[in-house]
Every structure is written in C-alpha cells, then in structure tokens.
Image (tube, rainbow, N blue to C red):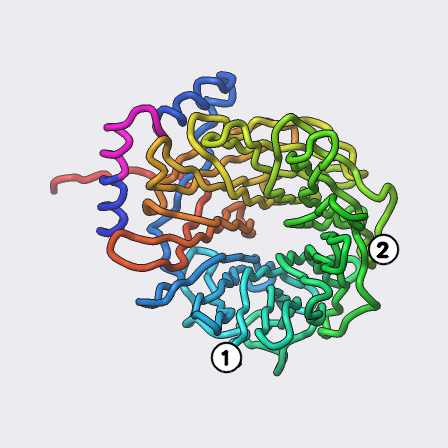
Amino acid sequence: MSTRHALFCAIAALILLSAPGISLAAHTRLTQSQPAEIQAQSKIISRVGDEITVYNEPSLVEASPAIAYNDIRHEYLAVWYNDRPGNDDIRARRIAQDGRLLGGPFYISAAGDGIDRRYPRVAFNIKSDQYLVVWEHQDISSGYSIHGRRVSGDGQVLDASDLIIRSAGINLYTPAKPAVAYAYTSNKYLVVWQETWHPLPISTSIVGQVVLDSGALDGGNITVSQDPGGYFRTNPDLAYNIGRNEYLVVWEQLDPAPDPDIIDLYSRRVTGEGAPLPPESTNLTHFTTSTTAPAVASLPTQPDGLYLVLYELHYKPDDWDINGLLISSDNIPQVSIDIAKSYSHELQPSLTASPNRGLFLATWKQVDNPSFIFSFIANALITPSAQVLDYRLDLYNLRANHPRTAAGWLGDYMVVYEDTPLTADNGIYGHLIGNRAYLPWTMKNH
C-alpha cells in the first residue's frame, strides 16, 4: 500500500469511527440484511495492488473518465477530458491487465481555442483491434455537436481530424451526453445521445448514429425515442447483446402527468444494424419518486443474453439508493434488486459484465451522511439470479467521483474515477479489483 493511500485510509477510518451514523453504519446495515449464504461469499473480490494514478497534472483538472477493455492485447484504455477553460480536450492512457501503466498519456482531440470537448465514452472493436472514442463537442462559433475518433489497439490515433457524428446546429438542436457500444456480429458501433430541439415546443429526444469501423457514418441519424414535447428524454446508455445481435438503449424520461416532477426510466431495443425495434419504448420504473442515471450491461453467457440496469432511486433528498433491474433479452423487466440501500447517499452508478465469471460488477459513488464532505467508491458483484454477492466500501481516497468500470479477461475488473486528494488537485485514478488468494510467508531459522 502506498504511503499516500495508507494516510487516506487512516483518516477515513477515523472519520467513520467518530461518526457511526455514516458510511460504516450504512455498510453494517446492508450486510446484516443479506441472507447468510450471501454473507458467506462476501470475500469474493478485493482490491489488487495499490491505487493507480492514471494521470494528475498539477493545476489541471482531469474529469469524467471512461474505460474499455481490449480483448486482443489484454489491456485497458482509459479516457477523460482536461478541464481547460475555453479549450477542454480529450486525453487517454493505456493500462495493462495487471494495472501497470503502458506509456504516457496522449491526446485524442485537442486543437482549437474556443472549443470544449467533454464527457468522453469509449468502446472496443475486437475485429479491428481499435477503439471508438466519442464526446460532447462545443464550439463557441457553431454550437454543440457529437464528435469522435478511432484509436488503434496500441494507442495510435487513427483519424487526422474528428469524425463528425452529429453536426452542430446553432439555435436549432443541442446534442449532448453521448454513449457508445460495439456490435460484434454487425462489426459496427452505435452512438446514442440526448438531443434538445429548441424551436417551440422544446423537446429532448434520444437519437443515434451507426458508425463503421472505417470511421464512416452508416446511413443517417436514428430516432430511438421521440419527445412529442414536454416529455424530456435524457442521459442515455446502451449495451450490446451478442446472442441476439441487438442493443438495449436506456434513458431517463420526464413524466409531466400525473406526476409532473417525476423521472422514470425507459428502454428500447435496436438491432446491431441500427434499426429500432418495437415497441417504441418500455417503461422500466414508475415510482412516487424519481429514478435517474441509468447504466446498463449485458451478460452474453445467459441464454439469448441478459441485461442488468442500475439506477439512482431518490428515496429522500439526502438519501438516494442504488437499485437494479434484471431485464430479459427481449426487453421484459424480470427482477428488481436493492443493491445499495443504506443511510448514506449513493449515486453515479456504473456497470460492467464479466462473461468469464458470469457476473455483473456495479460501482457507485457513496457520500458520507450527514456531512457530505467525503465520498468513496463502492462496488458489488451481482449474479444473473439477482443475488448481491459482495458489497465493499472501498476507500478510494476521500473525494472520489464518477466511477467507470470495465471487465478484464481473467475475471478481474478495472475501476477508474476522478478524485481530489488532500495534497493535490483533481485527477484520474484507478484500481484493479479481483479475486486473489495469497499464501502466507513461512520463516525458518537455519
């Protein structure tokens, strides 16, 4: 354990012990509510090695990381944006399967004052050994658009200029918050985003675009879910189901009537070729409180595939929970799961699935309550039968944010997140988590 990490863990432990009503008590509450057979398996995953400083440049704010796993080279690509006023840029770094940093950070898109690039997402194409990185692009002279670039498996940026996935439209539409996934059978990417149409009536729909591995756009934009006006659709995510060559796209949707301030979650299937399938939308959640920030993953080892959707449940203003919903391959909700239901504030869920282990890994930000000063990254393993096998409050520094997770080849997972250490500014950090068994050292006198 590094000296810095040990110091943070010691400080966090003192905070938790001096305030039993916050995260430590929350962890106890959740663990005690689990069945005995689940508690017995709670040692399934743990942190492997020290925390990884993916990148933290002094006096520069690195934010909003994303990560993908390369099944050919058995390594990860982490991406993020640098928050430079008036010139945010997209940067990346390769990470070995065992957590070693491979080479230095490199720029994916950076040129041009008056241009901000934010909220990158990344998907890996195993047939071409390449990644597609997409982001929200704002040009002060032309407005918002969705851009991307391809990156080779060894970290070379393949495109000399940005791929314009959705062009800018000043005063007409604002595309934002993209997500991307890769369809193996079709050998195509699908990028989805929220798009606000400004002429009255103002509406926000979920729109998509198929991108070929050559970087060319395949056809025109796809309307995944159209807002008729007032039923705003935002924050999409998607996952690919290889068993059916389909994506499941999920999003938030405002429910103006009869509950005018409630946000529900909806979903729709889209073929690997990019054709939306009926029904137009499926309502996944409809409670007396809002559900937000959907994250979805697919487990292809199940018959025809299986989806899990995570989301924030706004239980109380200062007490949000992380819930889940298992969804069959044909987009039918099956089982609801209480994943993190404590006295703390849980938010920002992220999700991945490991075919080798046949399990989902959920991660989220957990905020101490009532002080709301410190935040940690927690994680849980979830089975296809809706059992929460593991719950860990891992003390990744003290002010961690926006976790993203990818599953590796050996059943390990890499979690990346932004954090502000006590002695530095905001940067990108990571941790490898997995199942490790160590034999004790035996010392003999000769």
Q: Which residue is at the front of the view, 112 or 7?
A: 112
Q: Which residue is at the front of the view, 190 or 185?
A: 190
Tell me, yes or no, whether the highlighted magenta stretch contains residue 23. yes
State the residue position of label 1: 113
**SS label for mark 1:** loop
- The residue sitting at the right extreme is 278
Q: Label 2, label 1: how many angstroms apart (C-alpha)?
A: 38 Å
- Which numbered marker is on residue 275? 2
Specify the amino acid type for callout 1: Asp
In this view of the protein, can residue 370 be seen by the observer?
A: yes
For the point 67% across and 74% down, the residue is 163
Q: Quadrant of the C terminus?
A: top left
Q: Specify whether 210 is left or right of 439.
A: right
- The residue sitting at the bottom extreme is 160
State whether the magenta stretch is mostly helix, strand or loop.
Answer: helix
Image x and y of residue 178, in percent = 64, 58
Q: Is residue 424 above or below residue 397?
A: below
Q: Which residues are magenta?
A: 12-24
Of the numbered discs 2 and 1, the one sitting upstream in the chain is 1
Q: Is residue 416 above or below residue 293?
A: below
Q: Specify whether 269 is left or right of 92.
A: right
Q: Which residue is at the front of the view, 142 or 14?
A: 142
Specify the amino acid type for callout 2: Ala
Tell me, yes or no, whether the highlighted magenta stretch contains residue 103. no
